[in-house]
Image (cartoon, rainbow, N blue to C red):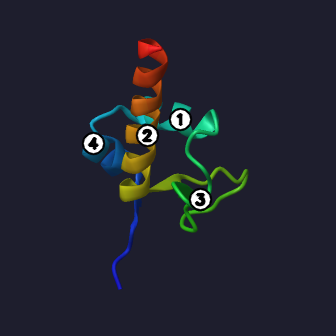
């Protein structure tokens, strides 16, 4: 079984965006929990501040869809 979840650093590099841009997409609700990202179950310390893990394939699809929507809005 292949692990589909990867760190924000690796996801950002693979998606060719910055970690800040990736985090902003998540915080704006454009990347959905459980589909595009999830909280890391490792290294939990108090106060609880888990790192996000990303599904690169699903993130890429969503980012491409958002890009297409933006271009459609510009053309209209």
Q: Are marks 2 and 3 in contact (CB under 8 Å)?
A: no
- The span from disc 2 to disc 3 (Cα, nearest Å) is 24 Å
Relative to residue 6, is residue 60 depicted above or below? above
Q: How crowded is mark 1: few (under 14 residues within 10 Å), some or many (20 or more)?
A: some
* Residue located beneath label 3 in the image: 39
The earlier-in-sequence mark between 2 and 3 is 3
At mark 1, the secondary structure is: helix
63 or 68: nearer the viewer: 68
- The span from disc 3 to disc 1 (Cα, nearest Å) is 15 Å
Q: Do the residues labelled 2 and 4 touch (CB within 8 Å)?
A: no
Q: Where residue 25 is drawn, which disc sits there?
A: 1
* Residue located beneath label 2 in the image: 65
- The span from disc 4 to disc 3 (Cα, nearest Å) is 19 Å
Q: Residues within 10 Å of mark 3 (few under 14, many from 20)?
A: some
Instruction: Kindly report which numbered mark, 2 or 3, lies closer to the viewer in this rendering.
Output: 2
- Please report the residue visible at 27 percent of the width from the left and 36 percent of the height from the top: 16
At mark 4, the secondary structure is: helix
Left or right of 48? Residue 9 is left
* Residue located beneath label 4 in the image: 13
At mark 3, the secondary structure is: strand
Q: Quadrant of residue 38?
A: bottom right
At mark 2, the secondary structure is: helix
- Please report the residue visible at 47 percent of the width from the left and 30 percent of the height from the top: 69
- Please report the residue visible at 55 percent of the width from the left and 45 percent of the height from the top: 31
Residue 5: horizontal and vertical position, in percent?
42, 64
């Amino acid at each position: 079984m292949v692990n589909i979840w990867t760190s924000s650093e690796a996801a950002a590099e693979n998606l060719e965006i910055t970690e800040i841009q990736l985090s902003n997409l998540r915080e704006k609700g454009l990347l959905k929990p459980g589909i595009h990202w999830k909280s890391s179950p490792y290294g939990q310390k108090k106060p609880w501040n888990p790192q996000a893990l990303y599904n690169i394939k699903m993130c890429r699809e969503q980012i491409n869809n958002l890009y297409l929507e933006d271009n459609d809005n510009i053309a209209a």
